[in-house]
Image (spheres, grey):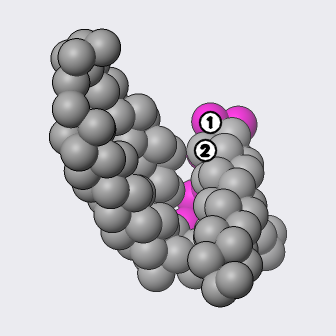
């Protein structure tokens, strides 16, 4: 349970690092098609990561909302509660992005 929560905190850091790696060497004379393919790669990886978060991190975070479950999985320290709050915040942001992406791609 704790490893899933730590992975949930580290995934946005991975995405920022991946975006920096992808877009770090773009020059003004880079062809537009190369930039578009990099954006599509970033979107694809981001959707995969958000899918992973929805499948694994979301259920574990919801389970940990109840105090009995936090006691059972030893999520009582301030550090682990902070990790849980950060994950719930990220999941809320992912949900807003997913709903926005779904609604805007329908039209």
Q: Is residue 79 left or right of residue 26?
A: right
Which residue is pictured at 69% across the width and 72% down the height? Answer: 104
In the rendered view, would you say 18 is above or below 24? below
Quadrant where the N terminus sits is bottom left
Q: Point out residue 81 in the picture as x, y percentages from the top left corner.
A: 69, 47
Which quadrant would residue 29 be assigned to in this image?
top left
- Residue that label 1 marks: 79
Say whether marks 2 and 1 touch (CB < 8 Å). yes
Q: Point out residue 55 in the picture as x, y percentages from the top left corner.
A: 46, 81
Q: Can residue 65 be seen in this view?
A: yes
Which residue is pictured at 31% across the width and 47% down the height? Answer: 36
Query: Which mark, by number, is residue 83?
Result: 2
Q: In terms of depth relative to the viewer, which is nearer, 86 or 1?
A: 86
Q: In terms of depth relative to the viewer, which is nearer, 49 or 99?
A: 99
Label 1 neighbour load within 10 Å: few <14, some 14-19, many 20+ = few
- State the extent of the magenta-drawn residues as a range: 73-80
- CA distance separating discs 2 and 1: 6 Å
In the rendered image, the residue lying farthest to the bottom is 106
Q: Is residue 104 left or right of residue 26?
A: right
Which residue is pictured at 42% across the width and 66% down the height? Answer: 47
């Amino acid at each position: 349970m704790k490893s899933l929560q730590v992975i949930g905190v580290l995934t946005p850091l991975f995405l920022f690092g991946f975006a920096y790696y992808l877009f770090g060497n773009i020059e003004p004379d880079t062809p537009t098609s190369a930039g578009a393919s990099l954006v599509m790669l970033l979107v694809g990886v981001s959707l995969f990561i958000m899918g992973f978060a929805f499948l694994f991190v979301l259920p574990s975070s919801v389970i940990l909302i109840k105090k009995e479950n936090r006691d059972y999985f030893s999520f009582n320290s301030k550090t682990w509660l902070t990790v849980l709050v950060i994950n719930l915040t990220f999941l809320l942001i992912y949900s807003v992005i997913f709903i926005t992406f779904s609604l805007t791609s329908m039209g």
